[in-house]
Image (tube, helix red, strand yellow):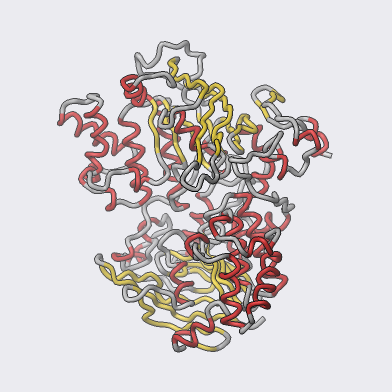
């Protein structure tokens, strides 16, 4: 519904056809070489992101969820080319980013911005809020004139719910929520079409999280922004995302529309994640069946054979330790990487 | 049930360059034997400082307990000598912290860290202590405990370290465990494991527990009674069921409304608490929540509302307008 009302107002943003996705990630792989130090221990290759593919449409929010070490943050960094991918393609507004040179990357970074988890460590403590927001406008010569920049900064502050006088403050003088608003304003300054939001609310207090989420949603409506929303909080992700991809040990194990993923999850890991989230209602919690997933996420240095989830999977069969399940489309737009997905759904309802 | 811990008008302050921070401002709460009580609130509300004050671990000289009593089994812990207090810590009241890595010694083996308390507090010899340590690791679900005893904390995963902290806490059969955000640093599936373990052990062993957290879901799942803190004060207290079904303080109501929930249909928009948490060095003269409160009346700006009984049971709230604060029913499942 939301997609239908969107208007793309920025001219010259793209030469691609309207139906092409804004971002398309194809078979993305990011490997890190670990160890090999003096002791020569633990040397090995970690495939932090292992053959990940997805796309994001203009004005859409894709949620990327998973537990620590699943590769969700590395995926974001690989898209931004902060960590250059080992292989695979990242097509953004029709351009392949993985082969861009520095000048090309600088241009690209105007169009893809990023918001980090901890606004305190991502804002320069020696600069005022005004300088922080104005800096990219000057560096990229978007608004070369000083007075015009100041006016732009004021408009941006207002747009993210801050006051003009906040421009003269330093980050340490602001609360956590206000600092994250500055982070949003800095990202918006470049007029991006995509913002990678890496755990943007998880460091904030509960009462402030909702403020920032509402702000991000308002901006999306106004500006037609797309978000890659990386987070571990499944309730927050459901609220903000149009579609959701679930990652486990470097792979996407399930991807679907919001409704399908939360109401009809197909991968056992997605089901376990949803079951683990405590619900703020003691009555419901008392009635709820407690399915606690055993074991822990294995070391990515020594990923299990076959399906990487099989050692913890409550429904694993012999084949799961031998065969790597591919993402399969079970229904239109709903894919899961489980040999038994689709086969188990029926018995669940009985 | 008998009262195990009775905190009365506790006051803890910190001297900072910005002025005196009244981190805990005449706060009273209690824990009955075998019960799980929660202290809930956002960062800076005083929940952790409350627990540290009970243990007398507030960092001096900046931090100081300036008033109140902490009665544990009838004895005021604030009047004990440092020597007597050392016997209480770990032996009778144990503590579990958010980040186990920072509370474990990285250069001592897991075994040594477990046996130390057993030898000091219970006077076990090293063989008996080692046997007990292995039992404790097994009890908290760490496989292959004998081998694990000779490993170091960095060889444990985050979840394993938290299990190890629980084993340490349970080592001397304490009557009370203070768990400060015990699962906040953990992933959601590991969080569920650790909370189940804590709950199960506390039930089986009859240990009372104080859980300090900002997570309303964790509280709903595990606490019998809940104290909600804001800006150094308790602003509402009730049984968990009563508090969630019938919150009578605007802050509690606001918190419950602001979090997205998986069990109800997705809302078009979230309902945040507007404004910012207060600066603890410059608290407003009246109700600290007043500037953010939609129920605010004139009186709120000048007079601090005391905790007072409302509704049935032991439900108390600190709001002049509590009678107007009523939760509207959640939309039912579609």
A60 relative position to A126: left or right = right
Task: Residue B160: name its quadrant.
Answer: bottom right
Residue, x 48% and y 54% (percent of image)?
B254
**Place of residue A289 in the rendered image (x, y in percent of width and height, measured from the top left):** 74, 52
**Residue B96 visible to an observer of this rendering:** yes
User: Residue B7 location, x and y as percent?
Assistant: 50, 79
Picture coordinates of residue B47, whole percent (x, y):
46, 67
Task: Please name the residue shown 48% across and 81% down the image.
Answer: B8
Where residue B154 appears, as percent x and y from the top left, is: 53, 56
Q: Quadrant of residue B262?
A: top right
| Camera sees residue B310 | no
Q: Nearer the viewer, residue A328 or B130?
A: B130
From the viewer's side, name the closer residue of B164 and A159.
Answer: B164
Q: How many marks?
A: 0
Q: Residue at x 51, y 41 (%)?
A: A231
Which quadrant does the C terminus of chain A fall into? top right
Q: Is residue A2 left or right of residue A335?
A: left
State left or right for residue B274 relative to residue B247. left
Residue A350 drawn above or below residue A80: below
Q: Is residue B173 above or below residue B287?
A: below
- The answer to which image quadrant residue A137 occupies is top left
In which quadrant is the N terminus of chain A drawn?
top right
Q: Is A7 situated above or below B14?
A: above
């Amino acid at each position: 519904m939301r997609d239908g009302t969107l208007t793309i107002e920025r001219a010259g943003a793209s030469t691609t056809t309207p139906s092409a996705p804004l971002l398309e990630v194809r078979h993305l792989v990011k490997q890190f070489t670990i160890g090999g130090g003096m002791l020569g221990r633990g040397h090995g290759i970690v495939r932090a992101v292992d053959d990940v593919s997805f796309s994001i449409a203009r004005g859409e929010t894709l949620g990327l969820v998973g537990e620590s070490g699943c590769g969700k943050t590395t995926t974001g960094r690989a898209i931004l080319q902060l960590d250059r991918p080992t292989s695979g393609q990242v097509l953004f507004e029709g351009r392949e980013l993985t082969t861009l040179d520095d000048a090309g990357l600088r241009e690209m970074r105007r169009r893809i911005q990023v918001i980090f988890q901890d606004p305190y460590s991502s804002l320069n403590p020696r600069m005022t809020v005004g300088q922080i927001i104005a800096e990219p406008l000057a560096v990229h010569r978007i608004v070369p004139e000083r007075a015009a920049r100041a006016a732009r900064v004021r408009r941006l502050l207002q747009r993210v719910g801050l006051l003009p006088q906040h421009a003269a403050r330093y980050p340490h003088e602001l609360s956590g929520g206000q600092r994250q608003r500055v982070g949003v304003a800095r990202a918006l300054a470049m007029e991006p079409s995509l913002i990678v939001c890496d755990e943007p609310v998880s460091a904030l207090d509960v009462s402030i999280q909702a403020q920032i989420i509402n702000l991000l949603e308002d901006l999306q409506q106004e500006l037609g922004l797309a978000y890659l929303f990386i987070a571990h909080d499944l309730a927050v992700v459901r609220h903000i995302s149009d579609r959701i991809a679930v990652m486990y040990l470097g792979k996407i194990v399930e991807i679907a529309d919001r409704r399908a993923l939360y109401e009809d999850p197909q991968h056992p890991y997605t089901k376990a994640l949803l079951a683990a989230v405590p619900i703020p209602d003691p009555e419901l919690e008392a009635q709820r069946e407690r399915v606690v997933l055993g074991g822990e996420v294995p070391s990515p240095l020594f990923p299990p054979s076959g399906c990487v989830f099989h050692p913890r999977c409550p429904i694993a069969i012999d084949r799961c330790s031998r065969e790597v399940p591919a993402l399969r489309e079970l229904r239109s737009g709903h894919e899961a990487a489980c040999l038994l997905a689709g086969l188990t759904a029926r018995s669940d309802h009985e | 049930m008998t009262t195990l811990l009775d905190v009365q008008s506790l006051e803890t302050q910190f001297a900072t360059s910005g002025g005196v921070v009244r981190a805990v401002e005449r706060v009273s709460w209690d824990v009955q034997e075998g019960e799980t009580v929660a202290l809930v609130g956002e960062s800076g509300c005083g929940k952790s400082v409350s627990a540290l004050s009970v243990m007398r671990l507030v960092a001096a000289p900046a931090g100081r307990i300036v008033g109140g009593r902490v009665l544990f089994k009838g004895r005021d812990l604030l009047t004990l000598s440092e020597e007597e207090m050392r016997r209480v810590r770990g032996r009778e009241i144990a503590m579990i912290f958010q980040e186990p890595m920072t509370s474990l010694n990285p250069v001592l083996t897991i075994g040594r860290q477990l046996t130390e308390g057993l030898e000091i507090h219970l006077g076990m010899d090293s063989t008996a202590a080692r046997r007990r340590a292995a039992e404790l690791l097994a009890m908290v679900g760490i496989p292959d405990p004998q081998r694990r005893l000779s490993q170091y904390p960095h060889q444990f995963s985050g979840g394993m370290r938290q299990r190890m902290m629980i084993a340490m806490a349970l080592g001397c059969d304490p009557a009370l465990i203070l768990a400060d955000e015990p699962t906040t640093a953990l992933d959601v599936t590991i969080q569920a494991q650790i909370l189940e373990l804590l709950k199960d052990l506390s039930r089986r062993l009859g240990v009372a527990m104080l859980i300090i957290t900002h997570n309303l879901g964790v509280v709903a799942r595990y606490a019998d009674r809940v104290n909600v803190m804001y800006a150094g004060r308790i602003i509402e207290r009730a049984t968990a069921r009563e508090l969630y079904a019938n919150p009578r303080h605007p802050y509690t109501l606001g918190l419950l409304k602001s979090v997205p929930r998986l069990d109800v249909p997705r809302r078009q928009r979230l309902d945040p608490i507007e404004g910012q948490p207060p600066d603890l060095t410059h608290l407003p003269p009246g109700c600290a929540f007043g500037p953010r409160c939609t129920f605010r009346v004139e009186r709120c700006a000048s007079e601090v509302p005391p905790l007072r009984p409302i509704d049935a049971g032991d439900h108390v709230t600190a709001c002049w307008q509590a009678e107007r604060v009523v939760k509207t029913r959640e939309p039912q499942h579609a």
